Image (cartoon, rainbow, N blue to C red):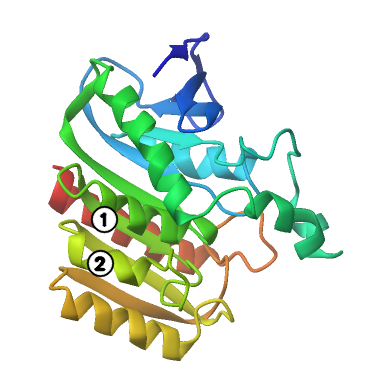
Amino acid sequence: MSNSNQATSVNAHGVNQTQITVEAKDGPTQVWVLTPQGEGQWPGVIFYMDAFGIRPAMIEMASHIASQGYVVLLADLFYRFGAYGPLDPKEVLKGDFRATVGPMMASTDNHKAADDTAALLAYLDSRSDVKGSKVGTVGFCMGGGMALTAAAWYPERVAAAASFHGGNLATDQPTSPHLQLPKVKAEVLVAGADNDHSYPLDMAQRFEAALTAAGVKHTSEIYEGKAHGWMKPDMPVFDAQGAERGWKELFALYARTLG
């Protein structure tokens, strides 16, 4: 793993922000590092982006986590695809969403993202401001399955894994996260919406059953009246009340598991 440090600045959300390059499984990827201000050591968190990629809203959300006392890594997992965006979800959704983000999504998957996670863990290990070896993961939409898969691939490292409006969590595909659950040692939080075609009720029930069968300590909920993507401030379906609830549950999970 190699990384090139660049200047650190305090961003609009009141946390330190640095952009570095990390040598991931299949090449160099840009990683945004968000940390609390001041001197100290904080647990590490790996943030898995959605299908619209890196943009101000993703950095805002990662900054919100960092402000609670965590060193947060937000990696551009579309590095295999090449240059893009930044995309504005509201504009993309007015047209052919699949035509725009489909090729980008096709460049990665849950297993490729889990491969990439090894380099992110190694980078966290190289930092003197990261407390302990246990980390949290969190993902939104596409990133939800990635955050859960990483917990299975690195069970000795990931103590908490959260998915918000993650899709396709229990499918017949070999990369389906539910197949990996027997390896998970983390406490898991899964929050879905009752208006989400990528995580319908029957899939939610299948995933819940797989969590229970695997003996994973978990909270699995469906947020009523919410739609796929409700946590993200730049989405047309953003729901402030639902987002506040989600953040509260995530930070409670991290407090229990990461200290």
Q: Which residue is mark 2?
A: 181
| Image quadrant where residue 15 sits | top left
Task: Give the residue drawn at x 41%, y 33%.
Answer: 73
Position above or below: 232 against 197: above
How many C-alpha atoms fall within 10 Å of the one at disc 1: few (<14), some, or many (≥20)?
Answer: many
What element does badge 1 sit on? helix
Residue 41 horizontal/vertical position (percent): 20, 23
Q: Which residue is mark 1?
A: 152
- Between 156 and 72, the one lying in front of the other is 156
- For the C terminus, which image quadrant? top left
- Identify the mark at residue 135; answer none if there is no mark: none
How many C-alpha atoms fall within 10 Å of the one at disc 2: few (<14), some, or many (≥20)?
Answer: many
| Apparent side of residue 54 relative to residue 125 in the rendered image (left or right) | right
What element does badge 2 sit on? helix
**CB atoms of marks 2 and 1 within 8 Å:** yes
| Apparent side of residue 109 relative to residue 98 in the rendered image (left or right) | left
| Image quadrant where residue 28 sits | top right
Residue 254 appears in the picture as rendered: yes
**Kind of residue sitting beneath label 2:** Leu
